[in-house]
Image (cartoon, coloured by chain):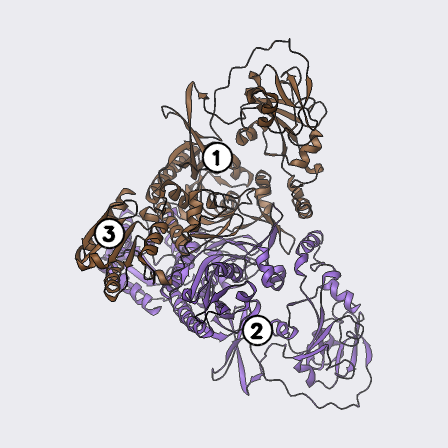
Chain colours: A purple, B brown
Amino acid sequence: MRYSKALIPTVKEVPADAEIPSHQLMLRAGVMRKIASGTYAYLPLGWRVLKKVMNIVRDEMDKAGAQEILMPAVQPMELWQQTGRNVDYGLTMAHFTDRHGRENVLAPTAEEVVTFIAANEINSYKQMPVNLYQISFKFRDEFRPRFGVLRSREFIMKDAYSFHTDNDSLHETYMVMYNTYCKIFKRCGVKYVIVEAETGEMGGSGSHQFTVPCDNGEDVIVHTEDGSYAANIEKASVDALPAIARTQNHPAVEEIHTPNKKTIAEVCDFLKTQPKDMIKTLIYINHPLVDDVKEISSYQATHKDGVGKHPPMTHWGKRFAVLVRGDFEINPEKLKCAAGESIELADEAAIKALTEAEVGFAGPVELLERNQVHKIIIDHSILTIESAITGANKTDYHIKNVVPGRDFPIAGDNVIIADVRNAVEGDTYKGQKLLFKRGIEVGQVFKLGTKYSAKLNAKFLDKDSVEKPCVMGCYGIGINRIVASAIETLYDKDGIIWPINIAPFEVIIVPAGPGEEIARASEKIYDDLTAAGVEVLLDDRDARGGVKFKDADLIGIPLRITIGAKSLAENCAEVKLRRESEVNKIPMADVKEKVLRIIAKLKGECA
Amino acid sequence: MRYSKALIPTVKEVPADAEIPSHQLMLRAGVMRKIASGTYAYLPLGWRVLKKVMNIVRDEMDKAGAQEILMPAVQPMELWQQTGRNVDYGLTMAHFTDRHGRENVLAPTAEEVVTFIAANEINSYKQMPVNLYQISFKFRDEFRPRFGVLRSREFIMKDAYSFHTDNDSLHETYMVMYNTYCKIFKRCGVKYVIVEAETGEMGGSGSHQFTVPCDNGEDVIVHTEDGSYAANIEKASVDALPAIARTQNHPAVEEIHTPNKKTIAEVCDFLKTQPKDMIKTLIYINHPLVDDVKEISSYQATHKDGVGKHPPMTHWGKRFAVLVRGDFEINPEKLKCAAGESIELADEAAIKALTEAEVGFAGPVELLERNQVHKIIIDHSILTIESAITGANKTDYHIKNVVPGRDFPIAGDNVIIADVRNAVEGDTYKGQKLLFKRGIEVGQVFKLGTKYSAKLNAKFLDKDSVEKPCVMGCYGIGINRIVASAIETLYDKDGIIWPINIAPFEVIIVPAGPGEEIARASEKIYDDLTAAGVEVLLDDRDARGGVKFKDADLIGIPLRITIGAKSLAENCAEVKLRRESEVNKIPMADVKEKVLRIIAKLKGECA
């Protein structure tokens, strides 16, 4: 391809709203452009990269015996109501009423539809195992889209779904997919780790996550020093801290005036105390009821001021107070497990209504007794506290000398004691110290079991003539995230450094300088390499060499061939790897062979 | 691929709700499955066909110098408001409010987004011409999805958009695309015709439509006997019928009781008259106002009884009565041109409110005078009528002796006389008789001009340093429709007959009978052909030969190789083309060569 004909709008300046290198570089290199919040268009370079990733994924999935299909992106709400996942996804799931009054979902994933297909088409054990996949458009109405394509609203996902007669067969395919994923990420040139993962909205009995470690990843992975245990932060178990033996001789609860001190840090600073001596109280509510989707939409439409993101109180369902020691953070996945249902942090209006105070002054005392919440969920860490400071449920006031078990219940029907906090530095698991790393989740595999097949009636007649629900697995890869994680893994101050197999072009030829001779020599190499099957970008623009070099570095083509007056006088070209600084002068006659050898070597590293 | 591992759920029975052969066969052959109204999942066979079509399209687009990109499917409503096309598309455009209160559109097409990109990235004449395309998910909330993928809600479209400095450059690319389309359809194996087309919602100055003639197509194309003129029915011009000279001596208008006679046919039958002596009166309203999208959504959500599809009367905007002679049909595209704005047939509630009568009794008399409509649009055919029967605007009544010009105006500020009817048999154009054919529209090319660039501010600095709006073209192909039209063009009572280049497999091997020897011989041919790059489906199922033959015919693989005991005894295989009845006995040693030769010949026919 000729650069002069291509739409590669590179930009010098770092875009203001791009926080991390992959996001910045994808914009600067003309890989993509923002169309709206969390919404991007892929320009020619970006789409070439995405296509290469998709082709690798497709090739390996086909080799693994999976069959490609295409399911609709706009799906009937009814199917989602049958599994209840419209509730689990909550506001993240975009939906609309069509002209015939039917409710449609923009698919965030496709378990429901694929199980619906299986329910109709798979009737006998003879038809299994079968593994169906698609590479397609998905949509999630993220609360806060950010980091470019790492958390965008629209994205391309490879999602595969396997159907089995039993768990053994599931495990077999699960391991085939596990190994296929290793091959895929290797070929894409990203370095990954595999950790145990929480199943989240997916449900099921087991899961592994493929994560590319990098400083700017949104995910945190946790592992023991010896590597015998590795999990993502959502999943990572911790040993419970030792609970204290309680004594009864604490002074009574006392109110303290803490004007406008809302956060743990502000209160600690004001009262000269430490986070570990405080109880953090958070209010959660469960999701709107299934049948109220319409009412909620109309409510949301009329409350766009940012206050009322939740439906009116009559729709709240159950309310929870969640307690954790001031120096820890709630883990939403663990919390969901503990609550036994999908719950969401309450918004400002709801917190005010329940605590009768501004946000920042919630506390556990009397919340349950006054029926403001249905349940209290208490993290193990609370049991390490003798006496603590917490919110007074009164604006600008906290209370001290709050003793767990004396001033609020730590046992009873409406109290749940559980591990609901994130692991932190210093935690152990099975006695071993836990270490932490940030990373980007690029893939996840799940053993789903019969969660979907049971609800959507995907049954088959087994060998023994008994009707059973299909056992399912599912396997996802974020196509766009592979692209971003490749950049986050390897870039420098000058730009992207693409892995060879997903680079938009393998080689860029830079005619550095004017004149017929340089142009002719460049064209010759371009023709030779193109004929040999190499993907070449010829920078035939009427621009200075410096501009061309800068762009070549920015767009990150693995191999650069420079044709300049000086080296051409010696009948040579200059060959340089993007990732190395060394420049090699190669006789023109040898350029093709040399380049093919380098490409083969680079590809060999990813095989 | 092995049939025993593949999900190819063939069905004997013709599905009840599938009206036309392509729809029936795509379901019966396990090519796709219905998920909801107008919504299909493509199973492995179907997706293989779609991928092949997409690859042909991609290959030819790339050869034509177009650059592939990917634009978002969920687009900001604001962009559509800037061009006003949210109004043009009306209820066909699905949209939803996201969690942050922003309005999003499910893209039916992408002129707005691509022009937004061009506005930001194309600044100079040096960057043009440029032709950007994508092959992607589109959605249209069709009023009546039908005929399988011919009118589905979700579909895959190849849409290309070119940007130019002037009309000459546009014309050049337009012709490149025109010729590229010819190559694409030829390679896909569909026989097409090219006709002049109406630009519809697209706007612009010129358009050609690529149509595959077949009995079940939704489109009608019209041409003169000598072929000098060909257009689709939306576009086809007709010579105006001779208007009569009016005399004044007609009897006065008289009411007739026509209980429950609503249609032209019913009234004619009841009153023993002819359609050509009647005036058909239709009520149209223009689309809801742009800013009221939210209110309309909420109105629609609360009026799901099917009565109130339109927003409340206060939102209707302008109302039109449209008159055409009883033996003609309104042409919506011509009507839109005549009205000068986008208008839609009113629904039952609106008609009742305006005519004060049940549907079926509307008439032109006094409608304008009583301010029930803002304008009357009169087709030329009305001017051929001396005196006619028409609705009385009173339930169960018509009126006779209605004289155009005496009983309702045929001139004046609020009267538009125009050609707003479809061409019919017997019509002429420039004196030549018009002939009719049905067909499926598979592609269309448009000269858009500056409609979008002007509204979305896509300007460039020309050679003369003057800022000008880019001149645009756009070029669409319905990927799914190519598949359906290939079937409609060629099938028989036994099933599909795929053209070689888009067939899911080129060859099917049928081991007909039990035994090691047949299996071994089949596997050998399977391996040989696969190694030679042929796409082979091996029917290794434990089933009778008859079942396998039936499925092979149904799924339409172009070439069948049968290995049976009898021919194997002679060391032969039987080779048969799906489209021919002849069976050729070929010595085993020659099978590979023979098959490769046949495939090359079949491909040659589509090159």
Image x and y of residue A295, in percent:
70, 54
The residue singled out by tag 1 in the image is B449
Which mark is nearer the camera, 1 or 2? 2
SS for dot 2: loop
SS for dot 3: strand
Pointers 1 and 3 within a single chain: yes
Q: Is residue B320 left or right of residue B583?
A: right
The image shows residue A42, relative to residue A178, as above or below, that is: above
Quadrant into which the C terminus of chain B falls: top left
Pointers 1 and 2 within a single chain: no
Choose between B351 and A142: the one closer to the eye: B351
Image x and y of residue A25, in percent:
47, 59
Choose between B529 and B75: the one closer to the eye: B529
Q: Quadrant of residue A272?
A: bottom right
Q: Quadrant of residue B537?
A: bottom left
Amino acid type, label 3: Val
